[in-house]
Amino acid sequence: MNHLLKLLDLSKEEIVDLLNLADQLKYETKHGIKHTPLKGMTLGMIFQKASTRTRVSFETGMYQLGGHALMLSSSDLQIGRGEPVQDTARVLSRYLDGIMIRTFEQKEVEDLAKYGSIPIINGLTDFCHPCQVLADLMTIREHKSVLEGLKMCYIGDGNNMANSLIVGGLKVGMEVAVATPDAYRPDPIVLDFAKEYGDKFTLTSDIFAAAKDADVIFTDVWASMGQEGEATERRKDFEGYQVNEELLAVAKPGCMVQHCLPAHRGEEITEETFEKHANEIFDEAENRLHAQKAVLVKLLKK
């Protein structure tokens, strides 16, 4: 494992290894056991999309690991004024020990890895969100003790979260059911991947069919960052694609609810359901820190 560009690149064993390391680092953090394997190292963090959880968790994680995180917005870099990605990658590789980038196009992340000589971490693109889904899998395993054999359900837009949940869930042995409107299906690359898993994957427009006997239900906002101009249209298209108590009634007793945040209460999830599952959702948010620390240690530790 030289980079974290997308979960499609990782094996089941690599994902489980990261989750095990994340559990260890979380235990050490909670028990005041210092771990500074990245002492003296610097992570460059390039943000072309705004962030709360990604920025704070990566910056805090590098600090706890003994290193330093350098915040770089697109306006701080010449890449924001047209410098080719390949030149930026080669320059930053001379200064930094790793780069985390949160951007729009997956190609930009892939190009940084192609032309640079240091580890690249995908903090989010329009195609996928691997760090979030590692935290999601970590949280499910904390609450359910296992991953293999559980049923994961996702309700909503077939966006970067849907893409990564499908890949991550199937790779670790979960059954995955996704409910989206027909016009908002997940990426064809991901659907081709899912075909390899046969009846372990279901894609439907029926949220109740997807949620039946689910162990965990995921959702996300109907209009993601950069789609604000489509918000009115999307509210109409996603009407009924809501996680609520009626939907949970068809899931297994004790079904978890997860949301990558921020949440739009009253749209993709009701206030009542969000608050009933708030502890699980904020465990998920916290685990961004621990899962990403595992990624940092795995990629940057010499």
Image (spheres, rainbow, N blue to C red):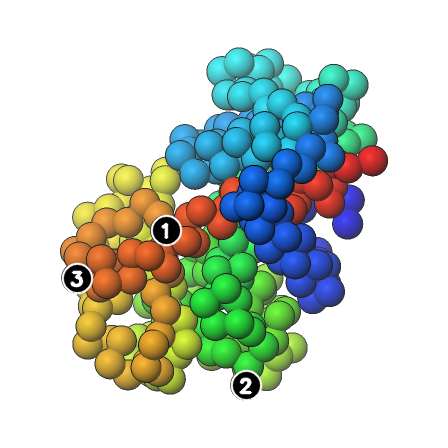
Q: Which mark is residue 272?
A: 3
Which mark sits nearer the N-terminus, 1 or 2?
2
Label 1, label 3: how far apart the Cα atoms are: 15 Å
Secondary structure under the numbered disc 3 in the rendered image? helix
Camera-side mark, 1 or 3: 1
Label 1, label 2: how far apart the Cα atoms are: 31 Å
- Seen in the picture, residue 154 relative to 53 is either above or below; the reply is below
Query: Of residues 172 and 81, which is closer to you in this image?
Result: 172
Task: Give x and y (percent) for residue 150.
Answer: 50, 78
Q: Is there any visible trace of residue 66 in the rendered image?
A: yes
Task: Give x and y (percent) for residue 269.
Answer: 24, 60
Q: Is there any visible trace of residue 242 in the rendered image?
A: no
Secondary structure under the numbered disc 1 in the rendered image? helix
Camera-side mark, 1 or 2: 1
Which mark sits nearer the N-terminus, 2 or 3?
2
- Seen in the picture, residue 81 relative to 143 is either above or below; the reply is above
Dot 1: few (<14), some (14–19), or many (≥20) neighbours within 10 Å? some
| Residue under pointer 2 | 199
Dots 1 and 2: beta carbons under 8 Å? no
Residue at horizontal 54 percent and vertical 59 percent from the top? 138
Q: Which mark is residue 282?
A: 1
**Amino acid at pointer 3:** Glu
Task: Give x and y (percent) for residue 178.
Answer: 42, 71
- Residue 92 quadrant: top right
**Amino acid at pointer 1:** Phe
In-image side of 124 versus 96 (left or right): left
Label 2, label 3: how far apart the Cα atoms are: 33 Å
